[in-house]
Image (spheres, rainbow, N blue to C red):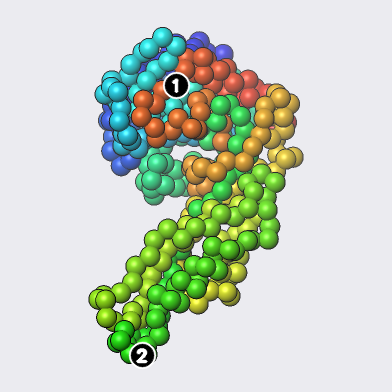
């Protein structure tokens, strides 16, 4: 096994935090990571702002595990007490934008991969450092998926306190349009599209989808925007409202659309069908490995690249989800130590269940 330690993770993370890497602006940080992997003896494949590296012990016909985390960040949120890109070392922690989400996961996965790339784990390993996760952009994991070869399962590096996020809610955003008939507001004319929308919204407000997931709970549906009318004395003929739906693993998006369409008066148009829910079966080797290590499993309400990966995955990494996208974001050195050690232990233990 190689000799990369949490100290290497801290030093690399300092470099990364100092480089602004907002979604779609990851070129500079990808340059640094590419050079780092080359200096570590690797030959990374560069696709736009994404990097792919395969382990040196590679055998055709074996199962392949993807190690994936993202290099992009959101823009600074709230009132920071310091420069978000200063990478401040303060006692037991590193403070800076992206340190927790998901820089700590990224550097820990990188060093776990480098430490194991010359080891016969019983399966193939491929590392993917990707872009545009924070905006679920098409220039990230989706853009390189076809170049990865056959992927049988994956670990998605996100801050989970090194607990296993074995399920993740999907996101379905729907534009709803009610259609009435215009008329003068002073007379009993027209069909008010806004009233039709209000009737729909009241149904949505009291709606309960019947299937509740043991991991993700019920489907959560919220009307978040509405737009109608052109002037005060005209009955509006059209109204548009937006429904934000967080879908559990017991429903497909198509089932959600079908149920809503049968009950609402609006014409429903989904913005995207990409960000689907996921669920790792309890008999999957990734789940069994975590269970054997005594790690807790839970369902995650937050989105990640897990939603875009068409293979069984677990979301796992150092840091705390609650720190993400907050001012003065930080990660503890002890979390980086636990992340590197935990990833390596998990990858070695997985051989017992998956080879």
Q: Nearer the viewer, residue 251 or 310?
A: 251
Residue at (63% x, 53% y) in the render: 218
Residue at (61% x, 29% y) in the render: 163
Which residue in the structure is indicated by mark 1? 331
Q: CA distance from mark 2 to mark 1?
A: 62 Å
Q: Nearer the viewer, residue 307 or 114?
A: 307
Residue at (33% x, 90% y) in the render: 187
- For the residue labelled by badge 2, is the local secondary structure a helix, a strand or a loop? loop
Kindly report which numbered mark, 2 or 1, lies closer to the viewer in this rendering: 2
Q: Earlier in the sequence, mark 2 or mark 1?
A: 2
- Count the marks: 2
| 254 vs 110: above or below | below
Residue 189 is marked as 2
Residue 238 quadrant: bottom left
Residue 99 percent across, percent down from the top left: 40, 25
Asked if residue 139 shows in the view, the reply is yes
Q: Along the horizontal axis of the image, is 131 left or right of 299?
A: left
Query: Quarter of the image containing the N terminus?
Result: top right
Asked if residue 54 shows in the view, the reply is no
Estimate how packed mark 1 is, as few (under 14), some (14 to 19) or many (20 or more) residues with alpha carbons within 10 Å: many
Query: Quarter of the image containing the C terminus?
Result: top right
Residue 118 quadrant: top right
- For the residue labelled by badge 1, is the local secondary structure a helix, a strand or a loop? strand
| 142 vs 251: above or below | above
Q: Along the horizontal axis of the image, is 196 left or right of 217?
A: left
Residue 294 percent across, percent down from the top left: 71, 25
Residue at (47% x, 14% y) in the render: 333
């Amino acid at each position: 096994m190689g000799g990369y330690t949490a100290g290497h993770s801290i030093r690399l993370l300092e470099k990364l935090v100092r480089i602004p890497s907002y979604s779609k602006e990851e070129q500079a940080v990808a340059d640094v990571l590419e050079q780092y992997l080359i200096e570590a003896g690797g030959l990374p494949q560069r696709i736009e702002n994404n990097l792919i590296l395969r382990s040196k012990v590679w055998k055709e016909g074996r199962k392949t595990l993807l190690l994936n985390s993202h290099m992009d960040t959101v823009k600074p949120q709230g009132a920071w007490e310091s420069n978000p890109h200063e990478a401040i070392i303060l006692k037991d922690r590193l403070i800076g934008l992206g340190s927790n989400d998901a820089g700590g996961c990224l550097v820990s996965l990188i060093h776990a991969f480098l430490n194991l790339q010359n080891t016969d784990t019983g399966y193939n390993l491929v590392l993917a450092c990707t872009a545009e996760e924070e905006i679920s952009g098409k220039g990230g994991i989706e853009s390189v998926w076809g170049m990865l070869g056959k992927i049988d399962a994956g670990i998605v590096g996100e801050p989970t306190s090194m607990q296993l996020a074995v399920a993740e809610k999907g996101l379905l955003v729907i534009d709803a349009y009610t259609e009435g008939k215009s008329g003068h507001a002073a007379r009993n004319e027209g069909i008010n599209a806004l009233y039709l929308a209000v009737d729909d919204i009241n149904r949505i407000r009291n709606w309960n989808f019947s299937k509740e997931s043991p991991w993700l709970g019920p489907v959560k549906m919220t009307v978040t925007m509405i737009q109608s009318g052109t002037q005060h004395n005209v009955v509006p003929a059209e109204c548009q409202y937006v429904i934000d739906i967080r879908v559990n693993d017991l429903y497909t998006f198509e089932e959600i659309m079908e149920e809503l369409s049968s009950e609402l008066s609006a014409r429903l148009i989904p913005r995207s069908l990409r960000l689907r829910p996921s669920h790792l079966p309890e008999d999957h080797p990734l789940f069994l490995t975590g269970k054997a290590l005594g790690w807790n499993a839970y369902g995650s309400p937050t989105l990640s690249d897990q939603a875009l990966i068409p293979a069984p995955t677990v979301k796992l990494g150092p840091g705390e989800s609650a720190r993400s996208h907050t001012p003065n974001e930080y990660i503890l050195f002890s979390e980086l130590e636990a992340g590197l050690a935990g990833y390596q232990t998990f990858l070695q233990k997985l051989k017992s269940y998956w080879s």
